[in-house]
Amino acid sequence: MPMFAAAGITAIALYALPVQAARRIIVIENMRFTPASATVERGDEVVWINRDLVAHTATSAGAFDSHAIAPGQSWTYVARVPGRYAYGCSLHPTMKATLIVEKSRGRPASQ
């Protein structure tokens, strides 16, 4: 009996480990978002870095809006709601991309 009790405690302890959020980088350069489609988990950080010569935005109607990201600057967004988000640059309408936010799959914390 004690062996099963210990195994149960171990299983509970492993299940309760904290989940480490990841960081996904999207580069804005040459008037495009790279990658054009990015998949993250709920709770992950998404960082847009503007390496272009002009300001850009990362804007998804009703979901997120970076406002102008100056050249050499970045903007960070925490993905909280699962879904598929078409987004673009409100200053340059031909620039389009997609952010896919999935439910957390329980990524283990980094040690």
Image (tube, grey):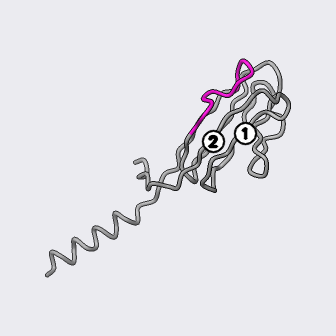
Q: Residues within 10 Å of mark 2 (few under 14, many from 20)?
A: many
Judge left or right: residue 102 versus residue 73: left
Q: Tell me the quadrant of the picture where the N terminus can be found.
A: bottom left
Check residue 38 in the rendering and tell me which mark sits there, or answer none: none
- Residue 6 drawn at (x, y percent): 22, 74
Judge left or right: residue 73 versus residue 37: right
Q: Is residue 87 above or below residue 101?
A: above
- Residue 9 drawn at (x, y percent): 28, 73
Secondary-structure class at tag 2: strand
**What are the residue bounds of the magenta stretch?**
28-38
Q: Residue at x 44, y 56 (%)?
A: 106
Q: Residue at x 75, y 25 (%)?
A: 72
Secondary-structure class at tag 1: strand
Q: Amino acid at mark 1?
A: Tyr
Residue, disc 1: 87
- Residue 102 drawn at (x, y percent): 54, 51
- Residue 86 drawn at (x, y percent): 69, 41
Judging depth in this view, the residue of 49 and 104 nearest the camera is 104
Q: Residues within 10 Å of mark 1 (few under 14, many from 20)?
A: many
Q: Residue at x 62, y 52 (%)?
A: 83
